[in-house]
Amino acid sequence: MRKSLRVFIDMRTGEHFFARTVKELRSQIGNGGSRVHKMYIDTADGTYHTGYVIGRHWLSMYRQEWRKA
């Protein structure tokens, strides 16, 4: 099964990346992607994984949805 395409948006610069895996994402970022940490958000319903911190990039994660016309 193939992973879905995700959009990652840098919270600081607004730059966006498209990747299916963290490995793909790190290769797009380049030299600044040495360490990877997960970002979480706490809500009343629980804690959710919302993106990654890779090097100096704080990336919010969104799944791209495909719709038929």
Image: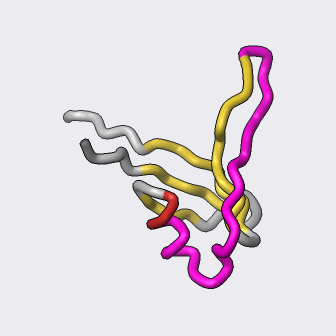
Quarter of the figure with residue 30: bottom right
Quarter of the figure with residue 65: top left
Residue depicted at x 66% and y 57%: 59
Residue furthest out toward the bottom:
31
Q: Which residues are magenta?
A: 25-45
Spot occupied by residue 20 in the image (x, y as percentages of width and height): 41, 55
- Indicate the quadrant containing the N terminus: top left, top right, bottom left or bottom right: top left
Relative horizontal placement of residue 3, taking residue 16 as reference (left or right) = left
Spot occupied by residue 26 in the image (x, y as percentages of width and height): 54, 70
- Indicate the quadrant containing the C terminus: top left, top right, bottom left or bottom right: top left
Residue furthest out toward the top:
45
Q: Magenta stretch: residue 39 in it? A: yes
Spot occupied by residue 39 in the image (x, y as percentages of width and height): 72, 47
In the rendered view, tell whether residue 5 sits above or below residue 14: above
In the rendered view, tell whether residue 19 sits above or below residue 55: above
Residue depicted at x 65% and y 38%: 49
Residue depicted at x 44% and y 59%: 19
